[in-house]
Amino acid sequence: MKKIILFAAAAAMLAVSCQESLEDRAAREAQEFTRKNCPMKLGNGITTDSMVFDKATLTLHYCMTIIGQADTTAIRNTDIKKDMVEGLKGNTAVRPYKDAGYNFQYTFYSEKHKGLKLYEVKITKKDYSTK
């Protein structure tokens, strides 16, 4: 009987230790998303180049390129955060991360002027929470 209890306890500990943390899952899924889907054209002259996860700040960071007519510094003066927040609220793919209170950051770069950051927005739980 002792052996059965010890075996059950060891099996339970092994099962718990093999579970992936949400932070590790976010990092893995971001890496897989980038590898499988990027670059990904979204329409309206925007391409998603990569997605990375920063464990220190619990932030999913999307790097994007603005192409063509939309590629102007005028975007710096455009308040797109509201649209980004609304899109995030309806995005069920990142629900576990929203439930955990993670941050989401979107950085838009110029295609014409390599490395030129046109716009950056960080969305926190305060922004997307409906509570």
Image (cartoon, rainbow, N blue to C red):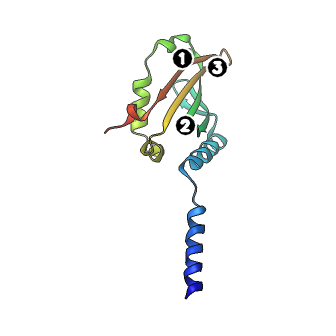
Q: Which residue appears at 32% of the width and 38% of the height?
A: 130
The kind of residue on which mark 3 rests is: Glu
Residue 72, by quadrant, is top right
Q: Which residue appears at 59% of the width and 37% of the height?
A: 54
Q: Residue furthest front?
A: 2
Estimate the x, y position of residue 114 in percent, counting from the top left: 68, 18
Q: Circle 1 sits on which residue?
A: 70
Q: Quadrant of the C terminus?
A: top left
Q: Circle 3 sits on which residue?
A: 111
Q: Which residue appears at 60% of the width and 85% of the height?
A: 3
The CA span between labels 3 and 1 is 10 Å
The kind of residue on which mark 2 rests is: Leu
Res 60 label:
2
Residue 35, by quadrant, is top right
Q: Secondary structure at mark 3?
A: loop
Q: Secondary structure at mark 2?
A: strand
The CA span between labels 2 and 1 is 24 Å
Residue 66 visible in the current orientation? no
